Image (cartoon, rainbow, N blue to C red):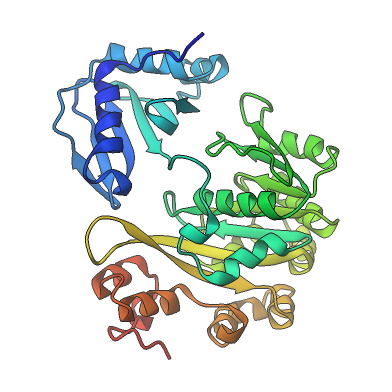
Amino acid sequence: MGEPSVPSIIEDAMRLCRDGASSSSTSDIHVEGNEPPWCRVDGMMHAMDLPPIEPDAIRAFCEAYLGKREYERLNGSSGAADGAIQHPALGSVRIHAFRGDNGIALSLRLLNGGIPLLADLGLPPVVASFADFPHGLVLFTGPTGSGKSTALAGLINEINLKYPRHIVTVEDPIEYRHRSHRSLVRQREIGRDVCSYARSLHGVLRADPDVILIGELRDPEVMSACLQAGETGHLVFSTLHTSEAAETVQRIVGVFEGGRQEQARMQLAQSLQAIVSMRLIPNAHGYGRRAACEILLNSPAVRSQLMSAERCVQIRNTIETSRKDGMQTLEMDLSRMVAERLITYEAAVAASDYPDQICATGAFN
């Protein structure tokens, strides 16, 4: 069977976003019944110059592109479902469908075609070295749409091109499909291949992996399994929706109860390799966005702070004084980008939780 056809107005919206003048800056399309579609360009929402979309067209889209299990979830008590398109004309698209006041609505994330090359993502050079870690835990954090999944895809590709390893990913859904090169890459999807991240990890650890990608650390069971895997010789990558490294540490430890928190601190101190907190900032020169990063590396000083609830508050200070080791706060990176006129001072301030630490001249002290 060939690809099912996309209802025409939804297809028009997708084509316009893929082929229009702002195509490289358009990340999402939002659709609901009896309303014109909207799109997100450089992080900002815009109404599209298209007619309203019929509810029947949205339901037809869901029937065509959501798997049977996800379509049942959409119509059942959960009222929401996820999926992905690999369309020959429209490219890769991540789907989130949900029921609302106007019936079924869609949020469509437009993914870049092909596997991203790490060198093309504009990340600090130290990030490429994460592909060389033999084991441990590497976390990418930030809000939705901050580039976490793309950065991880670039790192998995880097390992795939450099090393003869066995890479296993568990994603919800699969956004980038990797072909095996020097590494053997196997990808599993929540809902299609396994019912949850927690359930998947038992099987993954029996599959003789060297590298494991878990799409998101969602609960204590998944966090515990990832910490253990990082301790026992596996290189583990995952994501969290946190804004900075110190908050990430507190989030991980905080999901555990009572005495289990102390054990989690010890495991995190031993297994953590790096935390990268990301934002995408509008380009100062027009369309497009640039990645700004906070980077924490697990140095001896950081390791001792991770093991102590009292000293954990010192992590940010350690990042600020460890630039020579490749660490940086988000504000240090934003200040650099302002100095190089890559982004505006106003955009930098809007992206920061510590705006008073951003220098208008870009000279971070």
Residue 225 left/right relative to 170: right
Percent x, y of residue 75: 46, 15
The residue positioned 61% from the left and 39% from the top of the image is 178
Q: Quadrant of the C terminus?
A: bottom left
Percent x, y of residue 16: 24, 33
Of residues 78 and 82, the one nearer the viewer is 82
Residue 354 left/right relative to 346: right
Q: Quadrant of residue 337?
A: bottom left
Q: Quadrant of residue 95?
A: top left
Above or below for 320 versus 96: below
The residue positioned 70% from the left and 55% from the top of the image is 162
Q: Is there any visible trace of residue 340 in the rendered image?
A: yes
The residue positioned 66% from the left and 60% from the top of the image is 138
Of residues 195 and 108, the one nearer the viewer is 108
Above or below for 13 versus 346: above
Percent x, y of residue 359: 32, 84
Q: Which residue extends farthest bottom?
A: 365
Of residues 248 and 363, the one nearer the viewer is 363
Residue 226 left/right relative to 157: right
Q: Is there any visible trace of residue 243 in the rendered image?
A: no
Percent x, y of residue 129: 65, 67
